Amino acid sequence: MNAVDKKMENTNDLLIEKATELDYKYGFVTDIEQEIANKGLSEEIVRFISAKKEEPEWMLEWRLTAFRQWLRMEEPKWVNVTYPQINFQDLIYYAAPKKKAKLNSLDEVDPEIRKTWDKLGISNMEQNKLANVAMDFVMDSESVFTSFKDELEKKGIIFCSISEAIKNHSELVQKYIGSVVPPRDNYYSALNSAVFSDGSFVYIPKGVRCPMELSTYFRINAENTGQFERTLIIADDDSFVSYLEGCTAPQRDENQLHAAVVELVAHDRAEIKYSTVQNWYPGDAEGKGGIYNFVTKRGICQGVKSKISWTQVETGSAITWKYPSCILKGDDSIGEFYSVAVTNNHQQADTGTKMIHIGKNTRSRIVSKGISAGKSQNSYRGLVQINKTADNAYNFSQCDSMLMGGDCGAHTFPYIEIKNNTGKVEHEATTSKIGEEQLFYCNQRGIGDEEAIHLIVNGFCKEVFKELPMEFAVEAQKLLEITLENSVG
Amino acid sequence: MWDNLYKEIDIKYMLEVKNIHSQIEDKQILKGLSLTINKGEVHAIMGPNGTGKSTFASTLTGKDGYDITSGEILFEGNDLMELDPAERAHLGLFLAFQYPVEISGVSTTNFMKAAINEKRKANGLPPMEAKEFLALMKEKSELVELNKEFLTRSINEGFSGGEKKRNEIFQMAMLDPKLCILDETDSGLDIDALRIVANGVNKLRSADNAFLIITHYQRLLDYIVPDFVHIMYDGRIVKTGDKNLALELEEKGYDWIKESLANQ
């Protein structure tokens, strides 16, 4: 059996296990000793975090500036979601596993953490190596383990936690952090900038094609701990990187806030592919509990002929507020956004993208698929902006919604701003219902309701799934099936 | 004891429809329809529009909302009305739809794979081997002269009327059903497509299966020669004959039936 088959077999076992579990699979809590900051947010807490991480002075100053800006800002009210007021003074802003010695082998990892890995189906790092996946595992706020670093280092690729990067690659971080998403950009990016605890840092040098998919698993682990990751990916001239982000969180009764910031920078002819499968705890069938996911993701195509492609499959969270965007600054640069957002029960999602065309001959493509079931609300919100300088810019947008049952909602808010009359924008939108006719057609061929829904939904999302790396695509399909289980009576 | 004996007698029929009545939203549609079909037979049901032909097809296959208020339908001794549509399909009922449904992003290949494996699962069999499946696809698509590229395209999406109907017959061939119901398969077909569809059906005819062809015109029956022709009017079968009845009907028109009924 070759490595890929082996990996696939393991994936299949995992999927079968998942598919047979109705309850949220990842609703477990790892019991590790944690170092936790006091509740609440103040300048002292920001200083505490910075000191804990042994950050340079400039980083502390940057955080403090962001904090002061945040104090003057207000939570956005334009989003098509509702939730109880968050008490930011009732959250804990720093929690890190206590044991954090440098590790030389897998055996040195805390057994509790290894157990979590087992449950996540990544029991053997060797498997991942065979399958060409490098994992940077973030347990709560701290990176505990980074694999394949050596292999990447040989090519000059930097793939580490952002805390490490701040210490070891200070000048790179200082140059790029906040350059795509400035702290003052929005309420949550300011908050993140002040208190971010960890995340990933990737630098791909000139002319290097990253030989493997870079992958990070995020987990929220400690009760009442807001999770504020910060991810920064820089692709230098003529380089390529594909980055995978997968998320799971343990079951909780209280809502948990998550406000990440992801920044991507693509230089001349560089390409960044960023894929996310998000499966955070969505709350129970009544909508109790669940993650609030307020994320700012943005990439800049800085150089000519550069390309940034976002692919996301969103099945989790009680509330999702997320608009992975592209600033197309370099001439002939390309931005892409492929999204599947599924909401069930009482979930709310307001997601979409922004394509900002600045350079000449810039092109963007948006394919958004929203599926609503139960009592959920699913909104697409997208902006296509073609600026004065963007001669011959082109955008294609396709926004399709699918409704399952009569109590859910699908909404589309497309915004188009064109300041250059050589631009061309195409927009297609459809709303469909999984119809009785479609179901009966499947039934008549011997395909029962559940199986028919999987078939129809996977068909609906096919354009997005095919953008995902193989194993991710299989997992995403299964996630959808689990999310929509029993959603059509 | 009598029950068992009764069942044994019944089972000699493939399909037995006994005096069924149905209504849709207060409107009486089927009014005492009876019909028996044996293995190896081809039956045609003809009749004017709005007389309940398609309702009958939907009732047999179990579409939601098409229940019966009285009577009984037995398929190889099983009470069909107790079964859901997928279970009926697993027993070997197949409906070639009058208006085949589009499913975006689902290829005919994937659709058939799901259908075949669901049926196998219901019969306690493992999924079909990929190699066997592909060979079957190849064989059956040639039967209805269906171009390979149709198999990878989203099912029925952007297909012409003729292509949709051919795809239905292809699916029929793939699933090898016992009772094939063709609901106005000839409507919207040009003469070439009609011939291809009819050829496909003729090749599928065997001593073990049966066909129920619902049609408005005699035309299709030139190609698929029926053993029995039934004329349906006002929710029941009013006249049964051999293939000549269809020719007579074509010649004299449906008014002839209406008049002869009025004179009774």
Image (cartoon, coloured by chain):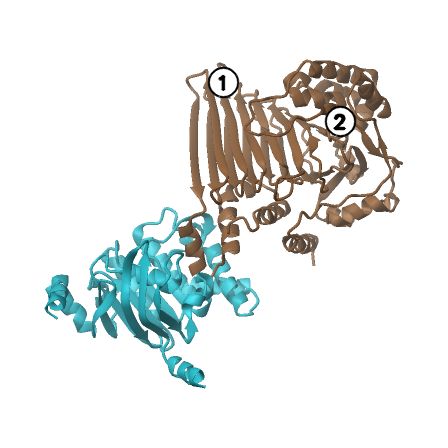
Q: Colour of chain B?
A: cyan
Q: Residue at x 70, y 48 (%)?
A: A131
Mark 2, residues whose alpha carbon is within 10 Å: few (<14), some, or many (≥20)? some
Is residue B198 in view?
yes
Q: Which residue is mark 1?
A: A390
Q: Secondary structure at mark 2?
A: helix
Tell me whether the residue at label 1 lies in contact with that at label 2, contact meaning CB atoms closer than 8 angstroms: no
Q: Identify which amino acid the numbered label 2 is placed on.
A: Asp
Q: Residue A90, which numbered label?
A: 2
Q: Colour of chain A?
A: brown
Q: Is residue A19 above or below residue A420?
A: below
Is residue A334 in view?
no
Answer with the quarter of the image where residue A176 lies: top right
Q: CA distance from mark 1 to mark 2?
A: 46 Å
Q: Identify which amino acid the numbered label 1 is placed on.
A: Ala
Q: Secondary structure at mark 1?
A: loop
**Chain letter of disc 1 in the image:** A
Mark 1, residues whose alpha carbon is within 10 Å: few (<14), some, or many (≥20)? many
Q: Would residue B261 appear left or right of A351 to someone viewing this image? A: left
Q: Would residue A278 appear left or right of A463 to someone viewing this image? A: right
**Chain letter of disc 2 in the image:** A
Q: Position of residue A124 (x, y in %)?
A: 78, 50
